[in-house]
Amino acid sequence: MSISAVNVQPLAVDVMCTDDALRVALADGRAISVPLDWFPRLEYASQKELKNWRLIGGGLGIRWESLDADVSIENLLRVR
């Protein structure tokens, strides 16, 4: 019996920020939650600013234009 790995490109489909976490839903059904303090520009932003995000690269990353902040999904999946 052989096992083959499937190379899946993680793509974001939804984003939510709480007072202390960035939560991202992925197209493959996974969800990522990381501390907001990993991203100082996001940590000190208002909820209004945090809600003003858009997906970039077809879901490869997230952009907050008013904060001049970008987060890649690949980096969120790496262990800190």
Image (tube, rainbow, N blue to C red):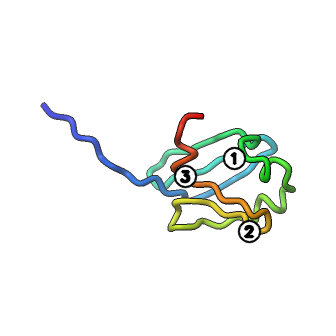
User: Count the marks: how many?
Assistant: 3
Residue 24: % across, % down: 61, 50
Identify the mark nearer the N-term, 2 or 1: 1
Q: Is residue 29 left or right of residue 52?
A: left
What residue appears at the point 33 percent right and 49 percent down from the top-left corner?
Answer: 7
Tell me which corner region of the image, top left, top right, bottom left or bottom right, holds residue 66.
Answer: bottom right
What residue appears at the point 79 percent right and 47 percent down from the top-left corner?
Answer: 40
Neighbours of disc 2 within 10 Å: few (<14), some (14-19), many (20+): few
| Mark carried by residue 74 | none
Q: Which residue is mark 3?
A: 73
Q: Alpha carbon of mark 3 to alpha carbon of mark 1: how far? A: 11 Å
Q: Looking at numbered disc 2 in the image, what kind of residue is underneath it?
A: Glu
Q: Quadrant of the C terminus?
A: top right
Q: What secondary structure is marked by label 3?
A: helix
Q: Is residue 45 left or right of residue 26?
A: right
Q: Which residue is mark 2?
A: 65
Q: Alpha carbon of mark 2 to alpha carbon of mark 1: how far? A: 16 Å
Q: Which residue is mark 1?
A: 22
Identify the mark nearer the N-term, 3 or 1: 1
Residue 46: % across, % down: 87, 56
Q: Is residue 50 left or right of residue 22?
A: right
Q: What secondary structure is marked by label 1?
A: strand
